[in-house]
Image (tube, grey):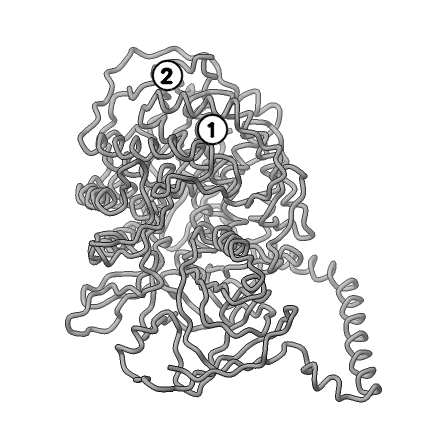
């Protein structure tokens, strides 16, 4: 179809840009059908240049990344549909028979950035011409005289020395000037005369007995039904009596404060933002030994035993699905990271039993005593962190540290707290950077950390979505270092330039501490949980940290201003991307939506429940409808990883269109998570019905008879969804947990006035007020 010519690849990888010029050959038709068949490429008219770049002879990214590259001629590549990262299969490693090694490298690349596997695809042939990143091509450099070369090298050396000297002399004055400017611009947030809202408090649970006790699904008596519709702007004080279920299943109560204690409370600062009135408590302080003593579990009088809340039919179906998945994991992947249910084997990522740890609190919430006991035994006897292995800081914090802390709070078993301390301390070397922005990878055995091999950047979402876990670890242990490290990251990001009406770029450099790749703003991968954790840290700390609230509300206003659009014909509200001042248009002019963005309806509803503007709840309802339609308008009833929204009314076209490279489903939880929040806060049964449809389709198209569930490659083919042979750990840790909570009518089953979920669905308690 295309004519191809290129200079022969070099024996050792060089790092140059390449330009692919597409020239039509036989069979080319500039029509819609042809473009659809070639939908894996962002096509340009014939004769125009399509800029790519290739890293280390294999890795290809779009021109926006500006990464050094190497000249190659590629006809077949594997591509990550989430990150658009390509891996050439005709590289030196391939020729030397290292095919499996190459696959392992680039599967790891995708896993560390977007949790997505790569898929094989064809690349149309073209004329590939190499253009060097350096000032002169090697050939032209050799043609220069010795004097010319000397002048050029001397000029570059002189400029480099001048730059170093200037930076050394001006860095501190610039920093102090910026700090003074920020202090002068800081708004006055105090509005006297308002009463503080009393947040529900969950004390640290008591230690479990050696035999784990007898835990059950018994719950305290149900509170009145959840409020319907958006809450009023002023936060209502929840019930002061916080009831906690201990490991023995007995409900326990904390007493109310005395009248003298109420009168002793001081006036608190108040934030007002576009009509929202928030009443934070006192400023958050780092844990101390005194606070640690106050937080220690103390004996409380047990309340009369209550009848257990009966499980309904849909909850029982979720439990059956969990047991089926657990059966496959136990039989074929016990103690390993992920199950491969079709080949009846396992996939290792960190070698730390990710699926098992992710599922611990799910089993406790569902009341699966036998499964929990055998998993606890593995944690006690087999889980060790003194391994010479590189782990991703973000994934380890949200899955392992978050899972262990959550299980400790629910069960009261000190084993999980000890394991949490161990992994938490081993992750701390990641913060040993010049800017204190953490590295992405840590070797937990050797105590060293480093950035990815291809860049010195970390993603903004990763460095700002570990705070809930490390802050809670500091509160429990009394060691300030954990919270001090992660709070420093948030304060630094708060002061950075490069934001666009509260929206942040996707990357931040660990050396300079500055945003990189400016101009691209998204709520998808690499930036999504930054916004989520702004809100949840504010809630976790008792609504005291005004900077977090300010950044969150500004970010949501930026989303409304720049990223919201309506689709056709049903006028669904969706969130797209902003790239260098333009709303992102991908593949035939269709803006795309990322399944990861479906966390946003739940976050907006949670914010509205805690007193943010009522229009946050209205937007949450609209976006939840869109996320549901990403399932309902697909042949299998399951959402692809990325959808493209039709913004122009055309006959016989749906709102949602799917491209070939985007049609896989990874059993993700974000939509079910948002349905849970919307049902908990509105009581509208339609959200339960939508969730039930999705669960049935998971059972129909992803369930493996011998045990487990699998991701699929093609949500548009009900007869052959093309299973990927992989069950992600978050299917047990998040997806099934949110299904179970969605179908429950018990508001006290993980009460959202007492707990806040981390981004891996591990509930952590809201802190007691000082």
The residue shown at (52%, 33%) is: 472
| x then y, percent, for residue 714 | 29, 57
Give the mark toward the camera: 1 or 2.
2
| x then y, percent, for residue 432 | 68, 46
Q: Is residue 193 visible?
A: no
| x then y, percent, for residue 334 | 43, 31
Q: Nearer the viewer, residue 737 or 265?
A: 737
Helix, strand or loop at disc 1?
loop
Mark 1: few, some, or many residues within 10 Å (few <14, many ≥20)? some
Spatial CA span between label 1 and label 2: 16 Å
Quadrant containing the N terminus is bottom left
415 is higher (above) or lower (below) than 280: above
483 is higher (above) or lower (below) than 240: below
Residue lying at the far left in this picture: please name it. Answer: 652
Q: Hey, which quadrant is residue 675 in on the image?
A: top left
Mark 2: few, some, or many residues within 10 Å (few <14, many ≥20)? many
**288 left or right, relative to 120:** right
| Callout 1 touching callout 2 (CB < 8 Å) | no
The residue shown at (59%, 80%) is: 131
**40 left or right, relative to 624:** right
Q: Nearer the viewer, residue 765 or 659?
A: 659
521 is higher (above) or lower (below) than 390: below
| Circle nearer the N terminus (1, 2) | 2
| x then y, percent, for residue 176 | 70, 57
Q: Residue 136 bears which disc, if any?
A: none
The residue shown at (77%, 76%) is: 156
Q: Nearer the viewer, residue 494 or 643?
A: 643
Helix, strand or loop at disc 2?
strand
Q: Hey, which quadrant is residue 607 in on the image?
A: top left
The residue that disc 1 covers is 768
Q: Nearer the viewer, residue 35 or 683?
A: 35
The residue that disc 2 covers is 252
């Amino acid at each position: 179809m295309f004519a191809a010519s290129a200079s022969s690849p070099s024996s050792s990888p060089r790092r140059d840009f390449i330009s692919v010029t597409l020239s039509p050959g036989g069979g080319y038709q500039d029509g819609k059908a042809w473009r659809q068949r070639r939908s894996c490429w962002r096509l340009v008219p014939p004769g125009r240049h399509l800029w790519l770049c290739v890293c280390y002879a294999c890795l290809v990214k779009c021109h926006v990344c500006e990464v050094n590259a190497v000249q190659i001629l590629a006809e077949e590549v594997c591509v990550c549909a989430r990150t658009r990262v390509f891996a050439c299969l005709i590289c030196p490693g391939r020729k030397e028979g290292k095919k499996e090694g190459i696959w392992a490298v680039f599967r790891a690349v995708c896993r560390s950035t977007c949790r997505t596997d790569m898929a094989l695809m064809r690349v149309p042939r073209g004329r590939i011409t190499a253009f060097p990143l350096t000032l002169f091509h090697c050939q032209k450099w050799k043609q220069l005289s010795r004097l010319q070369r000397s002048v050029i090298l001397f000029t570059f050396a002189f400029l480099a020395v001048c730059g170093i000297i200037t930076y050394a002399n001006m860095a501190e004055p610039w920093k102090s000037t910026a700090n003074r400017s920020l202090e002068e611009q800081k708004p006055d947030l105090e509005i006297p005369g308002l009463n503080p809202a009393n947040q529900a408090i969950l004390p640290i649970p008591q230690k479990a007995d050696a035999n784990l006790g007898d835990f059950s699904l018994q719950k305290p008596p149900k509170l009145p039904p959840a409020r319907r519709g958006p809450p009023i702007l002023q936060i209502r004080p929840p019930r002061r009596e916080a009831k906690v279920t201990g490991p023995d299943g007995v409900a326990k109560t904390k007493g109310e404060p005395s009248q003298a204690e109420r009168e002793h409370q001081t006036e608190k600062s108040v934030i007002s933002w576009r009509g929202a009135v928030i009443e934070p408590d006192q400023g958050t302080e780092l844990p101390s030994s005194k606070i640690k003593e106050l937080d220690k579990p103390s004996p409380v009088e047990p309340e009369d035993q209550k009848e257990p809340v009966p499980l309904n039919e849909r909850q029982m179906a979720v439990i059956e699905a969990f047991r089926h998945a657990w059966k496959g994991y136990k039989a074929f992947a016990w103690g390993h990271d992920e199950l491969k249910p079709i080949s009846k084997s396992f996939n290792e990522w960190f070698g730390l039993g990710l699926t098992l740890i992710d599922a611990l609190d799910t089993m406790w919430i569902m009341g699966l005593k036998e499964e929990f006991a055998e998993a606890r035994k593995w944690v006690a006897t087999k889980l060790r962190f003194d391994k010479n292995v590189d782990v991703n800081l973000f994934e380890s914090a949200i899955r392992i540290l978050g899972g262990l802390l959550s299980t400790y709070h629910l069960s009261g078993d000190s084993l999980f707290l000890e394991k949490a301390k161990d992994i938490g301390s081993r992750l701390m070397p990641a913060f040993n950077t010049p800017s204190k922005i953490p590295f992405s990878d840590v070797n937990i055995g050797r105590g060293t950390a480093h950035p990815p091999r291809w860049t010195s950047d970390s993603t903004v979402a990763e460095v700002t979505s570990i705070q809930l876990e490390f802050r809670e670890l500091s509160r429990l242990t009394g060691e300030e270092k954990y919270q001090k490290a992660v709070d420093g990251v948030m304060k630094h990001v708060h002061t950075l330039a490069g934001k666009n009406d509260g929206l942040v770029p996707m990357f931040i450099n660990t050396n300079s501490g500055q945003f990189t790749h400016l101009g691209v703003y998204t709520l998808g991968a690499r930036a999504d949980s930054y916004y989520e954790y702004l809100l949840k840290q504010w809630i976790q700390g008792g609504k005291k940290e005004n900077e977090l609230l300010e950044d969150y509300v500004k970010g949501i206003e930026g989303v409304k201003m720049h990223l919201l659009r309506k689709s056709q014909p049903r006028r669904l509200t969706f969130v797209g991307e902003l790239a260098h001042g333009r709303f992102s248009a991908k593949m035939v002019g269709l803006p795309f939506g990322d399944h990861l963005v479906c966390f946003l309806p739940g976050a907006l509803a949670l914010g509205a429940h805690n007193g943010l503007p009522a229009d946050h709840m209205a937007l949450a309802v609209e976006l939840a409808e869109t996320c549901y339609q990403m399932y309902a308008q697909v042949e299998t009833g399951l959402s692809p990883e990325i959808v493209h929204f039709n913004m122009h009314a055309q006959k016989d076209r749906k709102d949602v269109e799917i491209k070939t490279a985007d049609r896989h489903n990874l059993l993700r939880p974000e939509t079910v998570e948002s349905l849970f929040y919307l049902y908990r806060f509105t009581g509208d049964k339609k959200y339960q019905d939508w969730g039930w449809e999705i669960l049935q389709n998971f059972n129909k198209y992803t369930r493996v008879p011998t045990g487990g569930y699998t991701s699929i490659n093609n949500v548009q083919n009900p007869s052959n969804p093309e299973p990927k042979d992989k069950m992600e750990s978050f299917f047990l840790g998040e997806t099934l947990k949110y299904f179970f909570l969605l179908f429950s009518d018990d508001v006290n089953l993980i009460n959202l006035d007492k707990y806040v979920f981390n981004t891996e669905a591990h509930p952590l308690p809201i802190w007691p007020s000082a």
